[in-house]
Image (cartoon, rainbow, N blue to C red):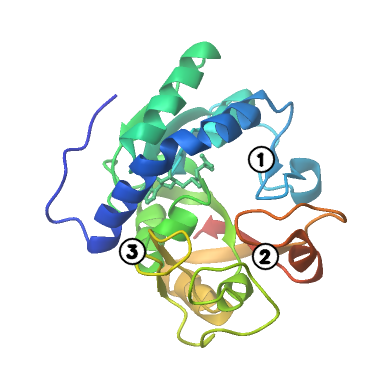
Amino acid sequence: MPRDSERAEYPEHVIENRRYWDAMADQWVAAGERAWRAEAPLWGCWGIPESELCLLPQDMSGMLAIELGCGTAYVSYWLTQRGAQVVGIDNSAKQLETAQRLANEYQVALELRHGNAEELPYPDGHFDFAISEYGAAIWCDPKIWIPEAHRILKPGGELVFLGNSPLAMICTPLDGGDNDAHLHRSYFELEKLDWTRCEIDPGGIEFNLPISSWMRLFRETGFEVLDYLELQAPKGSPDRFGTPGQWAQSWPAEQAWKLRRL
Ligand SMILES: C[S@@+](CC[C@H](N)C(=O)[O-])C[C@H]1O[C@@H](n2cnc3c(N)ncnc32)[C@H](O)[C@@H]1O
């Protein structure tokens, strides 16, 4: 697997997020193994079936796809099961170790690369499909990674990404505690969410935008919106990663965008 050396010119959030994910990669092994075992794709914190969300093309034969922030690479694996040839890029070498082990166990050929999804080592118009589930979708700067995803897609290629909703971010207390029914920060100032100094589970720098800013970014970059989904957790869902199941049943904790490159 091509290794990315520590790059001094990487922005602060890429360096911090590499440290954060390398340090906790061990805690994500079991979840990765479960997702590789799944018979069909299950999305997000509450495992909503692909049959409900329809995020993926049914037949990906002959497609070249990339997963941006692939982690343990189960999404990449799902794409190969639909016929695609897949590259997974991730900022954490430790996450990629798990991805490579699972790819070997499942005897699937994935090209795994260590690097930053904001600077992809591929030529313009190289891919038919790009995806991120909680990878670049939340850990990369949208003003950098969305144009970069546009650059490496062919005209007509799709970008699908899923992550925290802007609403979930403004309902997260500033100390990093569980989401609640209060608004803790300005919606209009959503952009960089720096959790490195919060009291509860400190570490990591995320990004999110108001919905109107996402829309403007897509338009200015050259993407058309095919669909925007606000995910509702199923009844009786457990609490997941600081979001009470009851909260996610009443309000959208997760968003998914389906875009087409013009
Ligand atoms: C929650 S995981 C999501 C991936 C996958 N769905 C999973 O759960 O294993 C987040 C991943 O994003 C990766 N990541 C964070 N910043 C990144 C960047 N700048 N470029 C590529 N990957 C990044 C992390 O290393 C981590 O593996």
The disc label shown at residue 253, or none? 2
In three-dimensional space, the C-alpha distance between marks 1 and 2, rounded to whole angstroms, equals 24 Å
In the rendered image, the vertical position of residue 9 relative to residue 225, given as above or below: above
**Quadrant of the rendered structure where residue 16 is?**
bottom left
Residues packed near mark 3 inside 10 Å, few (<14), some (14 to 19) or many (20 plus): few
Q: Which residue is mark 1?
A: 57
Mark 2 near mark 3, Cβ–Cβ under 8 Å? no
Q: Position of residue 235 (x, y in %)?
A: 88, 56
Mark 1 near mark 2, Cβ–Cβ under 8 Å? no
Q: Is residue 221 visible?
A: yes
Ligand 1 near label 2 (Cβ, under 8 Å)? no
Say which amino acid is labelled 1.
Pro
**Quadrant of the rendered structure where residue 179 is?**
bottom right
Callout 3: SS: helix
Q: Decide if residue 46 is on the left or right side of residue 186.
A: right
- Residues 227 and 177: in front is 177
Q: Which residue is mark 3?
A: 144
In the rendered image, the vertical position of residue 99 relative to residue 151, given as above or below: above
Q: Position of residue 80 (x, y in %)?
A: 57, 26
